[in-house]
Image (cartoon, rainbow, N blue to C red):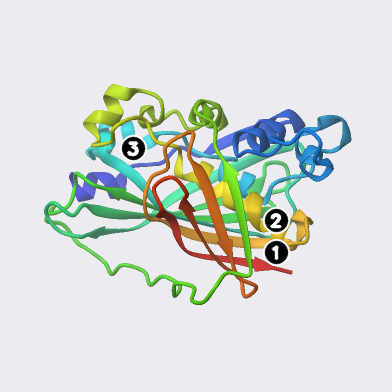
Amino acid sequence: MNYDALIAFQIPKMRQRFEPLDAVRYALSIGLGQDPLDAWQLQFVDDHKGPLMVPSFCAVLGHPGFWLADPRTTVDAARLVHAEEGFRLVTPLPIAGEVTGETRIVDVIDKGPDKGALVYLEKDLRDAATGTLIATETRTLMLRGDGGYGGPSGQPRPTPPAPTGKPDFIAEIPTRPEQALYYRLNGDPNPLHLDPVVAAKAGFAKPILHGLCTFGVACHALLRALAEQRPERLKAMSARFSAPVFPGETIKVDMWKDGAFQARVVERDIVVLSHGRVEIE
C-alpha cells in the first residue's frame, strides 16, 4: 500500500434517493419479519403502514460502495475486513427522500508487518435538498494485507470497556444461509460475501456475513429489549467486529441496562461483536 496515494484518494460523494421499499429490504436483510405473526416486526416490513425505520439503516444510506477496490487506492482489497462501526442520529430517519453521503479518511494506523493497517473513516449523511445533517457514521476497516507500509502512523482509538456481570437481556436471532445475498442488495457488493473463491483467498472457509448485517441484527435486538420497541429512542450505537459470522448461524445478543452489549455465535460459542455501546433516550 502507498500511504500517500490512499490519503489522496477522493472517495465518491454519493447522492441517493430511497423509498419505503428500500427500508423494508434493509429490515428483511437483518432478520426482521422472521415471525410473520409478530405485529411489532411487521411494522418494519409493511410499506403500506410506514414502515418503521431501523436506526442502523443510516449506515447503508449514502454508502460509497466498494471504493477500496479501485486500484488507485493501492490497497489489497481482497483482504480487508470491517473492524468497527458506529453512528449517531441527529434527526429521525425519513421513510423516503434523497440524501447525500460524504465519506472521508480520518487516519491510517500501521499495526506492522503481518498485522495489517487500520483505516478510520467518517461519513456525514445529509438531506440532499436542505443540507440538514441526519446522521454521522464512524467506520474502521482492517487492511489485513497492508501493514508495514512505511508511512506515517497515528494512534489507535480507545474502545469502551467490555461489559461485566450477567446480561440483563438476551436475544437469539437466527440468520439464513442466503442472508448475505440479501444483505448485499443494500449496496455492499464486496465479493467476499458472495464468491467462495474470493472468500478462500481471504482465508475463510466460505463467504462470510457482512459485518453491518451482524450490526443490524444487534440493533434489532436492542430496539426490542432496551428501547421498549420504539426506534426513535435509539440515538447512537457502536461496536467492534471481533470475528466473522457465517450465514445460517444463530446470533445471541447479550444486553445490559447501562447500554453495553455484545453478540456471539451460538454454534461456535465465539464473540462476534464486542465493546458494544448504545444510547437510548
Task: Tell me the mark number nearer the camera, choosing from 3 and 1.
Answer: 1
- Disc 3, SS: helix
Is disc 1 surrounded by few (<14), some (14 to 19) or many (20+) residues within 10 Å? Answer: many
- Disc 2, SS: helix
In the rendered view, would you say 68 is above or below 110? above
Name the N-terminal-most of marks 2 and 3: 3
Nearest the viewer among 75 and 280 is 280
Query: How far apart are the alpha carbons under marks 2 and 3?
Result: 32 Å
Q: Tell me where residue 81 appears, x and y as whole percent.
A: 34, 44
Is disc 2 surrounded by few (<14), some (14 to 19) or many (20+) residues within 10 Å? Answer: many
- Asked if disc 3 and disc 1 are in contact, CB closer than 8 Å, the reply is no
Please, what is the three-letter code of the amino acid marked with disc 3?
A: Leu
Mark linked to residue 68: 3
In the rendered view, would you say 89 is above or below 195? below
- Give the labeled residue for mark 1: 226
Q: Is residue 11 left or right of residue 76?
A: right
- Asked if disc 2 and disc 3 are in contact, CB closer than 8 Å, the reply is no
Please, what is the three-letter code of the amino acid marked with disc 2?
A: Leu
Q: Is residue 83 left or right of residue 123?
A: left
**Which residue does the image show at 49% across and 31% down from the upper left?**
180
- Disc 1, SS: loop
- Give the labeled residue for mark 2: 223
Query: How far apart are the alpha carbons under marks 1 and 2?
Result: 6 Å
Q: Tell me where residue 21 appears, x and y as whole percent.
A: 73, 28
Nearest the viewer among 124 and 120 is 120
Query: How far apart are the alpha carbons under marks 3 and 1?
Result: 36 Å
- Asked if disc 1 and disc 2 are in contact, CB closer than 8 Å, the reply is yes
**Which residue does the image show at 48% across and 59% down from the upper left?**
239
Q: Quadrant of residue 50?
A: top right
